[in-house]
Amino acid sequence: MARTKIHVGLEIGTSKTCVVVGEVRPDATATIIGMGEVPSAGVRKGEIVDQSMARQCVCDAWQMAQDHADVDIISVFVAVTGQHISCINSSGTYRLPDDREVIEQEHLDLVDEKASEIQLGPDQYTLHREWGEYSIDGQDPVANPVGLCGRTIDVNCHLIHGIKTRITNTLRCVRQVPLEVESFVFAPLAAAQVILTRQHKEAGALVIDIGGGTTDYVFYQGGQLIASGCIAIGGNTINADIEKLTEQRISKRVADILKRTEGNAFGDVKDKSLARFTGDLGMHDVAIERGMLNRIIRDRLAEALILIKKRLPADIWKPNSGISVFFSGGTSLMRGLDNLADYIFGVPVHQPAPPRDTKTPAYLEDPRYCTPIGLIRYAQRLDEDYSPRAGLLGRLSSLFRRK
């Protein structure tokens, strides 16, 4: 008899460290039963730079989530990001022997193996192999061709990989809490589990997750993942620019407040009116022209979006292509971001609405929690679709041994 399962997602982000506890019922419905969140320390642009500080943040968030959910947490799915993460597409072709015409599982295994024959450097670690559907004799793709007749099988594979030592740093941090790592998941791949439907992936969907330190993305077309990556620009980058480019002494905290409350990514850059921050507890007042504030925000966000567009196939941005852009992450709430993205991409843009001001936290409606909640959905996906392919994502104890 099926039982309720508990899955836990951990995001060690530049701005926050968050643990989400999900309860998955036998009918596949999932409920968030606990969450722990603390400001991050020891993390820069999505990567751990101080083990002890980052570990303490994970410990604090872990204990808060355990108390909130009233469960013992011993293992987690961990979101990872960082500019070291990149992707590559590959394909495989297999022709059945002359005396065979009915496709069997062994033939699929062989074509998968051919698509996986990518030589990465010894310093690289494969995070994901995301498979497309099979094509038989050049016909339209099918999900499971076992039992069909055909001569040639083709399959595409999108491989996401990163530098092994950077991923090991996260593994060591989590294990010293101590927690076990069920799997590492590229952050926007987790967020996409919450944001996108199957129909979105078929039509074409670009998910852009703008966090504190990085902007991550995944792009689907025809139901397949065909591009992904990370750019080292985030909300904190904008804060640093505001702090540096203004003529007044201003802290990053004040810069963040001005950005969120007064800035507009598509606002008038010639606006001479003043955006003000009234200091308290001995802090001095700050005033900055809204035009300058808007220009700083626009330039950095536009830089990130244009870099993403350049990394995607140039022929996809056609009128009526069906492609849409979806945003997540804390900086996705920036005013004017939808207009800026529409100007750059020229396709429909879906910007999340600001969270409602309610006494009950609306985690599912808050774009800041798409990644940790998406980890729960990703864990469900592995449960429902476990196969030799999914097994490639298996537990890491065999790869990174304890020392």
Image: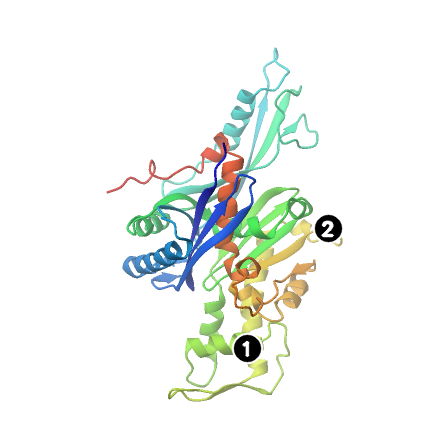
Q: Residue at x 49, y 67 (%)?
A: 235
Q: Quadrant of the C terminus?
A: top left
For the image, the number of numbered tags is 2
Q: Residues within 10 Å of mark 2 (few under 14, many from 20)?
A: few
Q: Residues within 10 Å of mark 1 (few under 14, many from 20)?
A: few
3D distance between C-alphas at marks 1 and 2:
35 Å
**CB within 8 Å, label 1 to label 2:** no
Relative height, residue 183 to residue 297 (above, below): above
What residue is pinned by disc 1? Answer: 261
Q: Position of residue 19 (x, y in %)?
A: 42, 55
Q: Residue at x 66, y 67 (%)?
A: 339
> What kind of residue is marked 2?
Ser
> What kind of residue is marked 1?
Thr
Q: Earlier in the sequence, mark 1 or mark 2?
A: 1
What residue is pinned by disc 2? Answer: 321
Q: Going by the image, does 305 lie left or right of 64? A: right
Q: Residue at x 51, y 79 (%)?
A: 258
Q: Nearer the viewer, mark 1 or mark 2?
A: 1
The answer, for residue 240, to whether it is visible in the render is: yes
Q: Going by the image, does 309 lie left or right of 172? A: right
Residue positioned most to the right: 320
Q: Secondary structure at mark 1?
A: helix
